Image (spheres, rainbow, N blue to C red):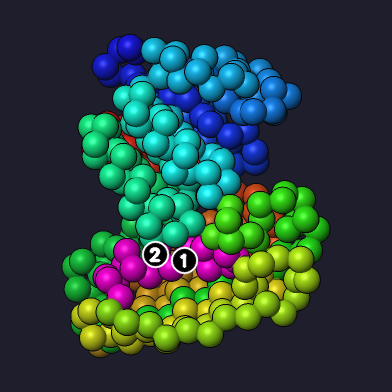
């Protein structure tokens, strides 16, 4: 096994998100990219050679590499259970791209495999590690905006039909789990729950308007009641022209916090009005890697997955 202070990491799946994971891992002080695996040897070679890692298209050779402590799963969502269970059974800790799986039952099965195998499991929700979100979390914890009574999340993005056609799994129930909610909007929904708390109940409408060859929804609207009595809404779309920045608005009795894209705006009679201003606030609105940085992934790998979990 690798040195206990530096964990060896292997990536499974060599699509576009594998580049982000590899870039994040390369910047770690406590992790090292050892190997990548894909059933397509050309994809495996592309990522492996690009990031100076071993590359495999034979699963047993990859998983038997005893330098690998952690497996980072970057396959289509509906494959997470199969890949994760095999890696956990081999004693490898898991980092799984969102969502954990395509159904609650399949996600729970993966959790159970990890518990049975005595390994840790982390799911990537890198937006929690944005400077603006960390500041929001701090302000809420300090009670700066007072008791929260309302929160809205809006993700009005656009994806072309060509985007869905580019990979057979996109927009399918079996491998994507659905449409905009489980794929694009899942980070925004996670942030709402992360910042406000658990949801008690929800009422929603979904439909597909702009894409003729997907099984999942491309538009959704919901009203929600949080366990802390706050109410709110979730609106999500991949059919909006023009695409807009993600918005989260949190209203407390003393003021309001607005996450506009990745920008934090503090409103109301609040003493601490720290505002962060990234270069862009429309990350991912028109295409998956628009304005995308590997830094939040690096933070989750280093601070959560490695320092605290593994």
**Quadrant in the picture for residue 68:** top left
Residue placed furthest toward the right: 162
Placement of 93 over or under 53, stated as above or below: below
Query: Mark 1: which secondary structure?
Result: helix
Residue drawn at point x = 70 percent, y = 74 percent: 239
Residue drawn at point x = 70 percent, y = 65 percent: 214
Placement of 304 over or under 146, stated as above or below: above
Q: Is residue 187 magenta?
A: yes
- Which quadrant is the C terminus positioned in? top left
Q: CA distance from mark 2 to mark 1?
A: 5 Å
Residue 97 shows in the view: yes
In the rendered image, residue 32, in percent from the top left (x then y), is placed at 44, 21
Q: 155 or 206: nearer the eye?
A: 206
As drawn, is 200 to the left or to the right of 212? left
Q: Is residue 28 magenta?
A: no
Residue drawn at point x = 66 percent, y = 18 percent: 49
Query: Mark 2: which secondary structure?
Result: helix
- Read off the magenta span: 178-199
In the rendered image, residue 152, in percent from the top left (x then y), is placed at 43, 81
As drawn, is 212 to the left or to the right of 290? right
Placement of 146 over or under 66, stated as above or below: below
In contact (CB < 8 Å): disc 2 and disc 1: yes
Residue ID for mark 1: 188
**Quadrant in the picture for residue 272:** bottom left
Residue ID for mark 2: 191
Residue 130 shows in the view: no
- Which quadrant is the N terminus positioned in? top left
């Amino acid at each position: 096994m690798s040195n206990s202070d530096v964990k060896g990491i292997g990536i499974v799946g060599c699509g576009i998100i594998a580049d982000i994971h590899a870039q994040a891992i390369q910047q770690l002080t406590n992790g090292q990219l050892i190997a990548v695996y894909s059933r397509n040897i050309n994809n495996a070679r592309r990522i492996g050679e690009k990031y100076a890692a071993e590359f495999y298209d034979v699963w047993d050779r990859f998983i038997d590499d005893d330098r690998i402590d952690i497996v980072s799963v970057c396959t289509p969502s509906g494959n997470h259970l199969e890949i994760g269970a095999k890696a956990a059974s081999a004693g490898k800790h898991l980092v799984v791209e969102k969502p954990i799986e395509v159904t609650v039952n399949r996600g729970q099965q993966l959790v159970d495999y990890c518990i049975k195998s005595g390994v840790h499991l982390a799911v990537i929700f890198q937006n929690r590690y944005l400077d603006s979100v960390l500041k929001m979390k701090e302000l809420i914890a300090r009670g700066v905006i007072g008791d929260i009574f309302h929160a809205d999340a809006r993700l009005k993005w656009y994806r072309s039909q060509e985007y869905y056609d580019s990979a057979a799994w996109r927009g399918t129930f079996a491998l994507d789990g659905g449409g905009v909610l489980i794929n694009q909007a899942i980070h925004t929904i996670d942030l709402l729950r992360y910042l406000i708390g658990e949801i008690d109940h929800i009422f929603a409408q979904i439909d597909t308007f702009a894409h003729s060859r997907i099984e999942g929804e491309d538009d959704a609207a919901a009203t929600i009641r949080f366990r802390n009595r706050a109410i709110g809404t979730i609106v999500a779309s991949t059919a909006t022209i023009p695409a807009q920045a993600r918005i989260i608005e949190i209203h407390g009795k003393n003021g309001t916090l607005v996450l506009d894209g990745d920008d934090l705006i503090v409103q109301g009679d609040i003493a601490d009005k720290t505002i962060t201003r990234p270069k862009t606030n429309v990350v991912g609105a028109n295409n998956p890697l628009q304005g995308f940085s590997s830094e939040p992934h690096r933070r989750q790998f280093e601070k959560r997955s490695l320092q605290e979990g593994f």
